[in-house]
Amino acid sequence: MTDALVVLTTAPDESRAAQLAETLVQEGVAACVHILPQGRSVYRWEGAIHTDAEWSLLIKTTRDLYPRLETRLQALHPYEVPEILALEVSRGHGAYLDWLAANVSSKIHPSFSL
């Protein structure tokens, strides 16, 4: 097991996905955010089936920074109940995992606090 996590979320449009990604990386709670092109989500919300276009984000962070990342996603996200799922990384390329750990910050960014 590593300290790395991949966190999944979605955004309603490409602009919002880019804003989320840039903010999370700039604030140091993510080393990298990969934005996948528009897809379609089919889901149940308030008793009805909905189909919407969404962009998926794959956020790379560490276990220690996950609480801050989750707090920021909840604050920044336009959805009432955003998808925020953390997947543990059991193994990975050592050099990439070292890069990931070196590119997140354990310091709280001045623009926010818990």
Image (cartoon, rainbow, N blue to C red):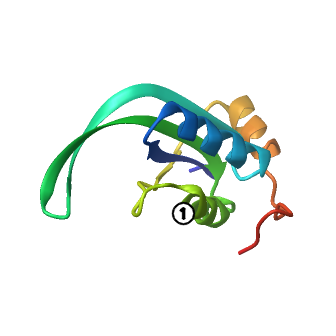
Position of 91 with respect to 82 (left or right) is right
Give how far across and how far down residue 34 sits, in percent. 57, 31
Tell me which residue sits at (82%, 65%) in the image.
Answer: 108
* Closer-to-camera residue (95/71): 71
Tell me which residue sits at (13%, 56%) in the image.
Answer: 48
* Closer-to-camera residue (87/72): 72
Give how far across and how far down residue 33 sits, in percent. 62, 37
6 in relation to 112, above or below: above
Give how far across and how far down residue 95 sits, in percent. 74, 30
Q: Quadrant of residue 55?
A: top left
Q: Quadrant of residue 109?
A: bottom right
User: Which residue was labeled with disc 1?
Assistant: 74
Question: At label 1, which amino acid type do we have?
Answer: Gln
Q: Characterize the local packing of mark 1: few (<14), some (14-19) or many (20 or more) Cα atoms within 10 angstroms.
A: some
Tell me which residue sits at (64%, 30%) in the image.
Answer: 93
Position of 1 with respect to 8 (left or right) is right
Q: Quadrant of the C terminus?
A: bottom right
Query: So how many labels did they put on this image?
Result: 1
49 in relation to 32, above or below: below
Position of 104 with respect to 70 (left or right) is right
Q: Quadrant of residue 100?
A: top right
Q: Judging from the image, what secondary structure is the residue with disc 1 in?
A: helix
Residue that sits furthest to the top in the current view? 37
Tell me which residue sits at (45%, 36%) in the image.
Answer: 56
Residue that sits furthest to the bottom in the current view? 114
